[in-house]
Amino acid sequence: MVGIKSYGAYIPRYRINHNTIFAAVGFLGTFPPPGENAVANHDEDTLSMAVAAGVDCLHAIEREKVDGLYLATTSQPYELRQNSALVATALDLQPSIRTADFIGSAKSGTTALLSAFDASKSGGSHNILVCASDCRLSKPGSPQEHLYGDGAAALLVGDEDVFATLEGYYSVTYDFPDRWRAAGEKFEHAWEDRFIRDAGYARVIPEAVSGLLKKYNLNIKDFAKIVFPGLYPREHGAIAKRLGADASQLQDTLVNKVGDTGSASPLMMLVAALEEAKPGDKILIASFGNGSDVLFFEVTEKIKSVGNRRGVTKHLNSKKELTSYEKYLAFRNLAPMDLGMRGEIGIRTPMSALFRERRAVLALCGTRCRKCGTPQYPPQRVCVNPECGAVDQMEWYRFSDKRGVVFTYTGDNLAASIDPPAIYGLVDFDGGGRFWFDFTDCDLDSIKVGMPVEMTFRRRYSDEPSGVHGYSWKATPIRD
């Protein structure tokens, strides 16, 4: 039986209160809804968040056993360059895997999940990592600015040792013109909100859910949790009532805490439901976007053995409020910042060198001496241990999943940074190895020598002339 073997999620550290946005630009027609949105840091995007969710999902799992990676998003950094392949490389997955991008719709997360189950059922793949991530850009002052949040979710799909079995699914598809963005456009367009709510959201989701219930002869009361995006809070409850569900069955939509995370939204809610699930629970999940996919799962006894995950709960409890709307615009590159002379030096990414050094740069892999066991970064031919000095006795060694401590650090107010001061320093890894890293998601006052840190995949720059986004790893305080 195919099902879910592991889960993970990622929510950025920063949150912006809706009132902060309203105080700066107002809100068309009414006051803003209560709550806050998760905001990606200036060095985060769809791919970096997908990697973070993948790391959480693959905790204590052998990455060599993963034979597929599907990425779902509506905000992919690259139109031509497979985004899922970059995520797979950053996660240091084996080259002999199948990767695919699922784009163009907010339901792409559930579509990717269904495709992973189909591949697993066929026997072609046994462990497929499905990552859904969105970091959508909204026009300042638009309704979407109050609604959209940034985040990612990841699910490992397999055909053995699953803790939630796929029991059924049903889909409907419509070319429903609620939101769209043509090729080359920066912002999306939205049609009249009442039309989206009444002709789309309030009709498509009940149609899809009713179709599944009829197909499998189920009653809505059979489900412990019902998951579907909460784009319209009042209508969200009304849909459940029309379906015959109780309010207690509804999973928190996270809209007031994180925002609508697009393709990641239903999967992130599913992760939150799994965090509290018990053996025997049935969970229904539905998406919305050009139709709807509906899936239902049954939780097994193996849910009790799920290891430590940050998931949704721990990320919700680890946050910092972004009180400056101007800094929010700078993070989004909607208010271009003068980075000084040092920030204007042109960057040209040597693509051939990046490919040759991809495991070192994108996967943060160094080497470990087979003779004495000393790890070091970047990869070397000669062992750095003065008592060893072995030559060409190295094996690959992954640092991205290792924790460490701060050996020394500096706060630099002269370095080019959207969020000064730039913080960087040396990290001593658990188990050996030392290297220099930029620090992110922290304040200078919070950094201390000896403080535990972990690695996080981030976007270092965007090379406008060549259209290349440069990624590598940074150090960040542990968010447990």
Image (tube, rainbow, N blue to C red):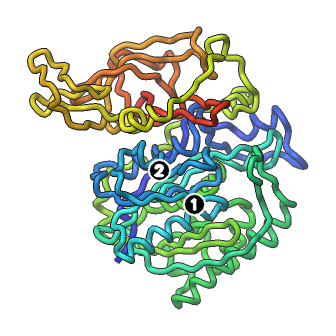
Q: Residue at x 74, y 61 (%)?
A: 232
Quadrant of the snapshot with the N terminus = bottom left
Q: Residue 175, how many percent across, how many down?
A: 75, 71
Q: Of helix, strand and loop, which one carries label 1?
A: strand
Residue at the front extreme?
Answer: 352
Above-or-below relation of 190 to 283: above
Quadrant of the snapshot with the C terminus = top left
Q: Residue at x 30, y 26 (%)?
A: 377
Q: Of helix, strand and loop, which one carries label 2?
A: helix
Disc 1 residue type (three-letter): Phe
Left or right for 338, reference 459: right
Residue 50 visible in the picture: yes
The image quarter containing residue 116 is bottom left
**Sequence-first disc among 1 and 2:** 2
Q: Which residue is mark 2?
A: 85
Q: Residue at x 46, y 58 (%)?
A: 99
Residue at the top extreme?
Answer: 414
Mark 1–mark 2 CB contact (< 8 Å): no
- Per the rendering, the mark at residue 368 is none
Disc 2 residue type (three-letter): Ala
Q: Residue 97, how many percent across, how many down?
A: 38, 58
Q: Residue 231, how many percent across, how many down?
A: 71, 59
Instruction: Say which of 350 and 103 sits in front.
Output: 350
Q: Which residue is mark 1?
A: 102
Alpha-carbon distance for marks 1 and 2?
12 Å
Above-or-below relation of 79 to 278: above
Q: Residue 294, how many percent across, how many down?
A: 57, 74
- Mark 2 Cα-neighbour bin, 10 Å: few <14, some 14–19, many ≥20: many
Mark count? 2
Instruction: Say which of 22 and 134 sits in front.
Output: 134
- Mark 1 Cα-neighbour bin, 10 Å: few <14, some 14–19, many ≥20: many
